[in-house]
Image: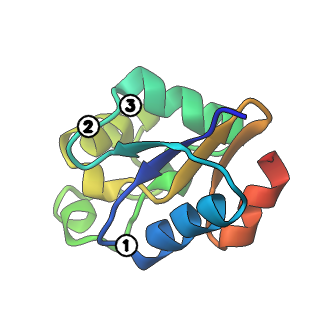
């Protein structure tokens, strides 16, 4: 099974998701999204596949989100472009399989797409 994880090694939830996959004998493609940031189209596709809006995938409590005045009234385009420019705004970890896409919070959500 092909699995991709958009990973932040400094995030405990992201590390837990990676460990979960490895514990299930899955070696995912690891995308360090802080340095290899997905483009607007990729993010839009991931969120659409999850059935969520960009705002729902926004780390709205991050200082940068507040500085940019990003909130539920912001357009999808505005949020997506902010995420590309400031990838720390993307909720993580995002796990992708052929069966679906989840934000793995809690880690057990990965089971839904395996």
Q: Which is closer to the viewer, label 3 or label 1?
A: 1
Report crowding for label 2: few under 14, some 14 to 19, many 20 or more residues within 10 A (C-alpha): few
Residue labelled with disc 3:
77
Q: Where's residue 3, x and y in %?
A: 62, 39
Q: Where's residue 9, x and y in %?
A: 32, 65
Give the Cα separation between the discs numbered 2 and 3: 20 Å
Residue 85 vertical position relative to residue 42 in the rendered view, above or below: below
Residue occupying the far bottom of the picture: 12
Residue 51 in view in this figure? no
Give the Cα separation between the discs numbered 2 and 1: 16 Å
Along the polypeptide, which appears first: circle 2 or circle 3?
Answer: 2
Circles 2 and 3: CB atoms closer than 8 Å:
no
Q: Where's residue 63, x and y in %?
A: 21, 71
Residue labelled with disc 2:
36
Task: Classify residue 98 as left or right of residue 12.
Answer: right
For the point 37% across and 27% down, the residue is 40
Along the polypeptide, which appears first: circle 2 or circle 1?
Answer: 1
Task: Classify residue 12 as left or right of residue 17.
Answer: left
Residue 52 vertical position relative to residue 88 in the rendered view, above or below: above
For the image, the number of numbered tags is 3
Residue labelled with disc 1:
11
Residue 112 in view in this figure? yes
For the point 45% across and 36% down, the residue is 76
Residue 1 vertical position relative to residue 61 in the rendered view, above or below: above
For the point 40% across and 64% down, the residue is 59
Q: Where's residue 4, x and y in %?
A: 54, 40
Of residues 33 and 2, the one nearer the viewer is 2
Along the polypeptide, which appears first: circle 3 or circle 1?
Answer: 1
């Amino acid at each position: 099974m092909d699995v991709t994880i958009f990973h932040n090694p400094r995030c405990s939830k992201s590390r837990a998701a990676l460990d979960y996959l490895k514990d299930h004998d899955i070696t995912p493609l690891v995308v360090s999204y802080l340095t290899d940031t997905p483009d607007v189209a990729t993010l839009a596709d991931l969120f659409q596949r999850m059935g969520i809006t960009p705002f729902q995938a926004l780390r709205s409590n991050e200082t940068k989100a507040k500085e940019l005045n990003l909130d539920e009234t912001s357009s999808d385009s505005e949020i997506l472009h902010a995420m590309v420019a400031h990838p720390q705004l993307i909720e993580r970890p995002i796990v992708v399989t052929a069966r679906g896409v989840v934000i793995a919070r809690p880690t057990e959500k990965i089971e839904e797409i395996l």
